[in-house]
Image (tube, rainbow, N blue to C red):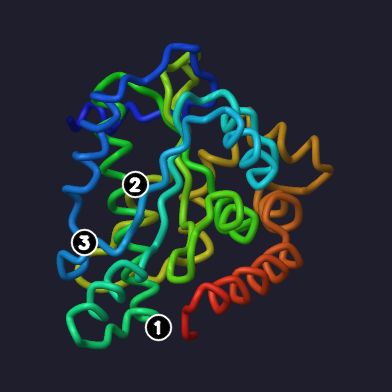
């Protein structure tokens, strides 16, 4: 298992071989064994296999080709609707639509998503996480007919790999692991921790292609611009409120 985790690759190209129903159910069953808040499982998983529905989802994910080409697309959602309904029919009032519970439900959704990913890779499948889900949540809500109380958090494409990409770089442990208390990093520490990433051929190409001075500028000024973050944050806040979250 440790070896498998170390070998994780993002797979964006898949063969046409379908994923059998039994295999998919095994993976989903492994997914729902994930830890979750209070064992309430405040998430839902929307399975999309219909090509017409995948085509409809594609623009919401900026037309990334793996949405159309993957045999299975999973949209993992935070979901307080089911628990509120359970409370209603049992003569009590649920209160899981606030900020604290949005965070809990989001964590739960990501835990189940990661369990699904590990189980899928253990079976030889490839996958890709899509961060575009929260960017265009309103469109996804409409396409998947998500009711109030349900908000899409992440999307995973699943299929049999048709590529073997190189392993993606990761920062060293010293960049992300702190023992006992948080350790402030000096500017020199930061430079040293990011040096290997910045020296990758791919990183150097990104900088040159975008006419920037360094990789940090590519991230902050091109890939994840401030104005885009502000725009999508406003859209997401409005969407959360329209879905019944009391923020």
- In the rendered view, tell whether residue 2 sits above or below residue 230: above
Q: Check residue 138 in the rendering and tell me which mark sits there, or answer none.
A: none
**Residue sitting at 35 percent across and 55 percent down?**
44
Q: Quadrant of residue 27?
A: top left
The picture places residue 51, in percent across and down from the top left corner, at 57, 28
Residue designated by label 3: 36
Q: What is the spatial separation of the Cα atoms under label 2 and label 3, in whole angstroms?
A: 12 Å
Q: Is residue 42 left or right of residue 144?
A: left
Residue 210, quarter of picture: top right
In the rendered view, tell whether residue 196 sits above or below residue 45. Answer: above
Coordinates of residue 15 in the picture (x, y in percent): 49, 12
Label 1, on which residue?
98
Q: Which of 150 and 129 lies nearest the eye of the viewer?
A: 150
> Given the current orientation, which residue lies at the most extreme right position?
211
| Vertical side of 104 occupied by 145: above or below | above
Numbered disc 1: secondary structure: loop
Categorize mark 1 by other alpha carbons within 10 Å: few (<14), some (14-19), many (20+).
Answer: some
Secondary structure under tag 3 reads loop
Asked whether 183 or 126 is in front, the reply is: 126
Residue 183 place in picture, x, y as percent: 34, 70
Nearest the viewer among 32 and 188 is 32
Q: Residue at x 76, y 67 (%)?
A: 227
* Left/right of residue 190 with respect to residue 217 in the rendered view: left
Nearest to N terminus: mark 3 or mark 1: 3
Marks 2 and 1 in Cβ contact (< 8 Å):
no
Q: How many marks?
A: 3
Circle number at residue 113: 2
Task: Name which residue lies at 24% across and 43% down.
Answer: 31
Tell me where residue 141 sits by quadrant.
bottom right
């Amino acid at each position: 298992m440790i070896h498998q985790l170390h070998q994780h690759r993002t797979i964006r190209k898949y063969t046409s071989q379908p994923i059998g129903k039994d295999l998919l159910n095994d993976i989903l069953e492994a997914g729902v064994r994930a830890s979750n808040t209070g064992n309430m499982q405040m998430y839902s998983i929307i399975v999309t296999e219909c090509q017409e529905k995948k085509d409809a989802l594609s623009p919401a994910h900026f037309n990334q080709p793996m949405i159309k080409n993957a045999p299975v697309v999973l949209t993992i959602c935070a979901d307080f609707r089911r628990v509120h309904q359970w409370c209603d029919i049992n003569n009590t009032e649920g209160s899981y639509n606030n900020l604290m519970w949005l965070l809990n439900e989001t964590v739960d959704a990501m835990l189940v998503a990661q369990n699904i990913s590990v189980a899928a890779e253990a079976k030889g499948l490839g996958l890709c996480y899509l961060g575009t889900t929260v960017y265009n949540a309103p469109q996804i809500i409409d396409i998947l007919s998500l009711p109030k109380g349900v908000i899409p958090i992440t999307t995973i494409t699943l299929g049999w790999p048709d590529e073997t990409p190189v392993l993606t770089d990761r920062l060293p442990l010293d960049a992300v692991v702190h023992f006992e208390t948080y350790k402030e990093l000096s500017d020199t520490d930061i430079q040293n921790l990011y040096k290997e990433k910045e020296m990758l051929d791919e990183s150097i190409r990104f900088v040159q292609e975008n006419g920037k001075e360094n990789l940090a500028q590519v991230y902050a000024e091109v890939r994840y611009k401030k104005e885009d973050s502000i725009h999508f944050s406003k859209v997401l806040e409005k969407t959360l409120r329209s879905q019944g979250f009391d923020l």
